[in-house]
Amino acid sequence: MIELRDIHKSFGSKHVLRGVDLHVEKGTSMVVIGGSGTGKSVTIRTVLGLVRPDRGQILVDGQDVTLADRDSFLARFGMLFQAGALFDSMPVWQNVAFRLLRGSLRRPREEARAIAIEKLRRVGLKPDVAELYPAELSGGMQKRVALARAIAAEPEIIFFDEPTAGLDPIMSGVINDLIREIVTDMGATTITITHDMTSVRTIADNVAMLHDGIIQWTGPVSRLDHSGNPYLDQFVHGRADGPIEAIR
Amino acid sequence: MTGPGAAGAAPKGTEDGRPGPARRLLAWLMAALASVGRSSLHLLASVGQVAIYAGLTVTHMVRPPFYGREFLNALLTIGYFSLPVVGLTALFTGGALALQIYAGGARFSAEAVVPSIVAIGMVRELGPVLGGLMVAGRVAASIAAEIGTMKVTEQIDALVTLSTDPMKYLTVPRVLAATLALPVLVGVGDAIGILGGYLVGITTLDFNAAAYLKNTVDFLETWDVVSGLIKGAAFGFIVALMGCFHGMRSGRGARGVGRATIDAVVSASILILAANFLLTNLFFAA
């Protein structure tokens, strides 16, 4: 289980998180929604230690993340970055097998390559993609490779940061279905950041709405359309009028 | 409030309420002083950050894990691919140096010192300094741009989530490679620079080839060469460190990466010249 308690984070005078409380049960898929710049990405970055919160506590399976051994803690995680964040100096298979080629999860090179090709196949890419460099791939293919890298070491917890950003509706659907399949098959605990409602409905077991630096609403995806929460209603229905100020 | 006391304490403004010339001058001086103060604090903070970064880099060099493949890649990029630019610079500098010393020496009939001065000048000063500056232009810029781009495209964050310390994976291999490669580049540059002087000496200045070589070897001491190589190692450390430091601190977007690249080259060049003075003072001051 992942638990965030009263997380605060400011960047200069800008208070991004003002007391985020979030519970994600083991083996479930939580989707965090909210407008651009509301701190969704900052929230998951605090869990990974990429951003240090000013205040609050983060627990993973009851253990404070600041007290955990960093290497073994991170070995439990996989992360899909918004822009893929593939290493452009190495071919696709080495990107996917990055974790398997070094560190505590190191495997023989041929075995790591075979696992990488298997993971590429899992996300719908052919083996001949393995030798290409990220710059030679389309946006959708890069996203799939990044997804393959996120699951390569079969992590217990996976974070997806805007998995469909910049993709056309068809490719977005493909990525959403892949994520749902992977989550179900692997039984992983996942947090997905998005403002794409199609992604929410495909991926989520539970949804949390972040606005004004706090979680405004959280509940199962089945209650999304009749939550009674004015923030969520405005966001889900894409209305300009409501408690969320739209800048025009 | 009225009366002479109150009038004396009031701001010296003009009748239309705007501040007078004295007050404007004072405000301008205060703003200038504040600007100098801010710049000084910023400089001191940067010096401290570079010192901490250098210390961390050195401590990580002796602690596992080590990334051998990254080190070899960096050695190839920094060392081997810098050979042409360092070699050409040294060749032309050696030739120009021979012409200058000959012209200057002719004023007091000392043309015969050309071979020895070219050799000593190249191995002690020009080889390491020009080699360092050329590599700074090529390598510090390249490293800062590469790491800066990695930062703005979240590749550095990705490294962290993949249980890889960016300091160990990106900085240490590059700094170590540059520290080891620069002395070799300087050595090759020294030889090519002396060759440049030799070619000019025998083709333009009518030196006897054998006599030129004999004069070069006779007056060159081991310490002249070794001191230049030590300088090369120090300059290599500076070049890669500045590239990595500014790359890691790169701001967002293309503008941020461009700024990091400029800062890396400028700071590496200035630090090379400063370090050269300090090392020369240390090695050769009476």
Image: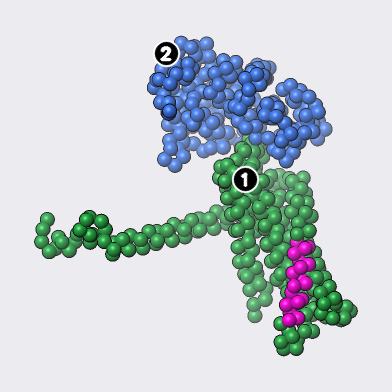
Bounds of the magenta segment: B86-103
- Kind of residue sitting beneath label 2: Gly
Q: Residue at x 78, y 58 (%)?
A: B84
Reading the image, the residue beneath label 1 is B148
Q: Residue furthest bottom?
A: B108
Q: Is residue A3 left or right of residue B10?
A: right
Spot occupied by residue B97 in the image (x, y as percentages of width and height)? 74, 74
Picture quadrant of residue B281: bottom right
Residue B91 on the magenta segment:
yes
Secondary structure of the residue carrying numbered label 1: helix
Chain of the residue where label 1 is placed in the rendered structure: B
Question: Dot 1, how many residues are within 10 Å of its Cα: few (below 14), some (14-19), or many (20+)?
Answer: many
Q: Which quarter of the rendered picture does the C terminus of chain B lie within?
A: bottom right
Secondary structure of the residue carrying numbered label 2: loop
Q: Residue at x 60, y 15 (%)?
A: A202
Q: Residue at x 20, y 58 (%)?
A: B15
Q: Is residue B256 above or below residue B97?
A: above
Q: Is residue A138 left or right of residue B37?
A: right
> Is residue B46 in view from this perspective?
yes
Is the magenta region chiefly helix, strand or loop?
A: helix
Q: Colour of chain B?
A: green
- Kind of residue sitting beneath label 1: Gly
Q: Colour of chain A?
A: blue
Question: Dot 2, how many residues are within 10 Å of its Cα: few (below 14), some (14-19), or many (20+)?
Answer: few
Contact check, label 2 and label 1, Cβ < 8 Å: no
Q: Between B23 and A15, which is closer to the camera in this rendering?
A: B23
Q: Which mark is residue A109?
A: none
Q: Is residue B31 left or right of residue A76?
A: left
Q: How many marks?
A: 2
Chain of the residue where label 2 is placed in the rendered structure: A
Q: Residue furthest right?
A: B210
Reading the image, the residue beneath label 2 is A228
